[in-house]
Amino acid sequence: MTEDRPLVTVVVPTYQREALLPATLDSLVALEYSPVEIIVVDDGSTDGTPALLAGYAARHPNLRVLRHDNVGQAASVNRGIAEASGAYLIVVNSDDPQPPGMLGPLVGHLEAHPEVVLVYPDWEMIDETGLPLAVVRPPDFDRVAMVAWSECLPGPGSLVRRSAVDAAGGWDPTLRTCPDWEWYLRLSLHGPFARVPQVLARWRSHSASITMAERSEAAARERVMVVERFFAREDLPEAVRAVRGEAMRNTYILAAAIVTTELPGPGARFTVTDRLGADRLTAEASREPATMAPAERVLWLETLLAERAATTDWLHAEVAQRDETIAWLHREVADRDRTVTWLHSEVADRDRTIGELRGGATRP
């Protein structure tokens, strides 16, 4: 009976998404879970988005449209949260169509584990046309590891308790490229997260998405600033505060990868690759790299680099074994030298004894 199940609010911030928005909205109104309220927040679109949304709101009673002047994604999410009535909240990008069975397992996990404040699933990366590119399987939740790795474990399909949102607050409207990451860091201080190991969400990779378009020095600096500001808090558990050095090192590495995903040319001294991310992705390898979409090519390159890193690790192990063999040989040579020295001493003693015996034999 749906009346016994908690209401879920889906917040959809959107801006200039006339082409991709219909697929997302169609997927949300077709969700198998009920009851659901869908709040679409139009951040001042000037294309055909307003008329498109008016049509959907007229056809679907559980879909509501809010509109304001262009103030940014984070402020739009916050307005949707403020208007939400659900016990659980999920933010869905307006260009990401979702599978129909997304909510049931996530709500079920939160209902069964009242101590958990957020659940996140495995998810599928699709291209601009909707074709699958890869499946992403994030690690199980570990708050200290998440901070130390500077790794945003929650991704598409993350479902949050409204009570945790009320305690932690909404998205930071001063952030442009990673307000969700900063939000997850704050939420993690109010209770554990949990991974649901099922592919229950989708994320569309295309050149106009914020993730792909905002690869700049400003985006890298914002990521660093978020982590620095997090460690400036006075309410961090000691176990989290203890990994600050590792977290900052990994944040700077990630910032370098944000600035550019290009492989270094001849003579370059350094390269940056997310080996953890490459290990979590299952890429489609049937197409030649030259025919790949840009996001898919980045995935292929990361996988290739991970394979090369694995080869490097093997070579390091071989070198370490060689070094152990050399050290053993050095010890054997040292033992041999000690034996030779002892033998020389024995010969010298023998020669002295013979000399003394000969000297005694010549006395009158």
Image: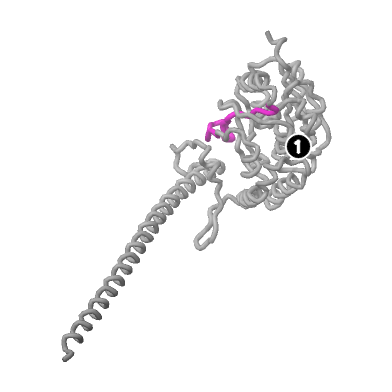
117 left or right, relative to 344: right
What residue sits 63% from the left and 21% below the top?
109
What residue sits 61% from the left and 51% below the top?
253
Q: Main secondary structure of the magenta part?
A: strand
Is 276 or 20 nearer to us in this picture? Answer: 276
Residue, far bottom: 364
Residue 144 is situated, as x and y percent measured from the top left of the image, at 64, 40
Label 1 amino acid?
Gln
307 left or right, relative to 156: left
130 left or right, relative to 162: left
Is 143 or 334 nearer to us in this picture? Answer: 334
What residue sits 77% from the left and 30% below the top?
165
Is 346 or 189 nearer to us in this picture? Answer: 346
Q: Image height check: is 149 above or below 1? A: below
Instruction: Say what secondary structure mark 1 lies in.
Output: helix
- Crowd rating for badge 1 (residues with CA inside 10 Å; few <14, some 14–19, many 20+): many
What residue sits 64% from the left and 34% below the top?
154
Q: Image height check: is 363 above or below 312? A: below
Q: Which residue is mark 1?
A: 73
Residue, far top: 1
Residue 270 is situated, as x and y percent measured from the top left of the image, at 55, 58
Q: Which quadrant would the C terminus be assigned to in this image?
A: bottom left
Q: Which quadrant would the N terminus be assigned to in this image?
A: top right
Q: Quadrant of residue 326?
A: bottom left
130 in magenta: yes
Which stretch is magenta? 116-136
